[in-house]
């Protein structure tokens, strides 16, 4: 990855398919996609901040299980907070909220945080790499959720606080209802990755 | 539901990869992930993880009304135990290429990831008894292996086909996974219930 060229910025999530499989099932609507992406982003960023100092006072044998426990605790705290903000949204995401602890993004953050130096394997700042990947994950997750909901159900769910979510009707019919199912999620993501590659080539980049 | 129904549902209708998105696509895995050692390792790791999580969930956390903490206990107890068993299997193997060594190696890789966590959480939270949870988790592991096996076969065919450049690799695999998920959706819970009885 490189920040040198301006213009089109590579999306490591679509290029590397990081944490993409749970995403295609969990992000059924804009609200769920945004909530899942935000959870993964916060977990990854906090792991990037917390793990390196924790490594200093933990013995080598305990570092891996402790890192995983911290990741699980962060996912749990996010799940509880989301449950308080919007019980309907937390219920919709269900089992995927605790699984944020082992999402692809969290595992990347854990792996990057395990490097002894402050920079990652390619010399960039560790936190900068995690922040960029997290930001792309959040954007991708929200966009996939919105696309699936608009094309699949003809509506858009807004992540408002409270017992129920507010929905905006975009169309009075369901153009591609299959997109709401996991199968539709895989198919939509396949087209998105292909579109990303076309855009990447048009901008003169070869990929990551 | 009968044990046969639980097994069929876990393999097809609730397939770990195609219905829940646990694990990763074959594009991201080493070739040969659909081997016998992979299938056995998946089943073993899932059974150990699900049994542990079921015991923690039902015998410790549920009476204390702390079921939402199951993921934390899983990370603290189950993952180190799986890794320990995997390393013991590797050390106990007679030679490096033996089935036991490969089992240990693959189990060690699998211990941390959404696949084992997800299947264990589903088994513990779905209200199954312990034998049912064990059957469901082993079948889920085999279902994941089946989808990987089929997708690897599709990938081999795709490598020989004239696929448009932007769709080569991951996009073609995602589209194939979507079509396969559609086929698996046909074998839903109602169909299984009608087939094998409640």
Image: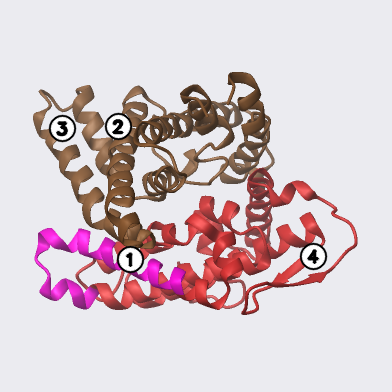
Indicate which label's residue lies in the foreground, 2 or 3.
2
- Image quadrant holding the N terminus of chain A, namely bottom left
Examine the rendered structure and indicate whether residue A184 appears above or below residue B103. Answer: below
Which residue is at a point 62% across and 61% down the rendered structure image? A200
Depth check: give the residue in front, A74 or B121.
B121
Palette colour of chain A: red
Q: Dot 4 surroundings within 10 Å: few (below 14), some, or many (20 or more)?
A: many
Q: Which mark is residue B89?
A: 3
Q: Both on one chain, marks 4 and 2?
A: no
Examine the rendered structure and indicate whether residue A203 appears above or below residue B141. Answer: below
- Identify the residue position indicated by label 4 in the image: A155
Q: How far apart are marks 3 and 4 (CA)?
A: 52 Å
Residue B21, given in percent of the width and then of the height, sits at 52, 46
User: Mark 1 and 3 residues: CB-CB less than 8 Å, in contact?
Assistant: no
- Identify the residue position indicated by label 1 in the image: A71
Which residue is at a point 41% across and 33% down the rendered structure image? B141
Q: Main secondary structure of the magenta part?
A: helix
């Amino acid at each position: 990855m490189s920040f040198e060229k301006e213009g089109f910025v590579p999306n490591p999530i679509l290029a590397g398919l990081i944490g993409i499989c749970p995403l295609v099932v969990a992000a059924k609507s804009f609200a769920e996609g945004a909530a899942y992406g935000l959870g993964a982003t916060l977990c990854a960023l906090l792991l990037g901040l917390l793990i390196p100092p924790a490594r200093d006072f933990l013995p080598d044998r305990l570092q891996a299980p402790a890192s995983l426990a911290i990741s699980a605790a962060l996912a749990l705290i996010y799940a509880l907070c989301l449950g308080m903000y919007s019980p309907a949204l937390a219920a919709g995401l269900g089992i995927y909220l605790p699984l944020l602890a082992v999402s692809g993004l969290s595992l990347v953050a854990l792996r990057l945080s395990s490097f002894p130096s402050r920079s990652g394997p390619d010399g960039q700042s560790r936190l900068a790499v995690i922040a960029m990947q997290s930001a792309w994950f959040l954007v991708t997750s929200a966009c996939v959720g919105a696309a699936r909901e608009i094309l699949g159900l003809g509506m858009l769910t807004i992540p408002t606080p409270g017992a129920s979510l507010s929905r905006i009707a975009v169309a009075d019919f369901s153009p591609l209802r299959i997109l709401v199912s996991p199968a539709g999620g895989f198919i939509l993501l396949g087209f998105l990755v292909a579109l990303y590659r076309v855009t990447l080539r048009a901008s003169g980049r070869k990929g990551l | 539901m009968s044990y046969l129904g639980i097994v069929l549902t876990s393999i097809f209708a609730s397939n770990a990869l195609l219905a829940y998105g646990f694990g990763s696509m074959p594009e991201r895995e080493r070739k040969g992930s659909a081997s016998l050692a992979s299938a056995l390792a998946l089943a073993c790791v899932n059974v150990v993880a699900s049994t542990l999580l079921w015991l923690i969930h039902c015998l410790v956390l549920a009476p204390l009304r702390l079921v939402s903490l199951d993921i934390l206990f899983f990370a603290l107890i189950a993952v180190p135990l799986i890794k320990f068993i995997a390393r013991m299997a590797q050390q106990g193997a007679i030679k490096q290429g033996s089935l036991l060594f490969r089992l240990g190696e693959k189990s060690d890789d699998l211990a941390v990831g959404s696949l084992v966590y997800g299947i264990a959480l589903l088994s513990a939270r779905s209200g199954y008894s312990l034998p049912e949870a064990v059957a469901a988790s082993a079948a889920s592991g085999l279902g994941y292996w089946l989808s990987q096996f089929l997708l690897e076969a599709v990938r081999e065919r795709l490598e020989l086909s004239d696929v448009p450049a932007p769709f080569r690799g991951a996009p073609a695999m995602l589209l194939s996974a979507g079509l396969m998920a559609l086929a698996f959706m046909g074998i839903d819970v109602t169909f299984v219930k009608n087939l094998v009885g409640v």
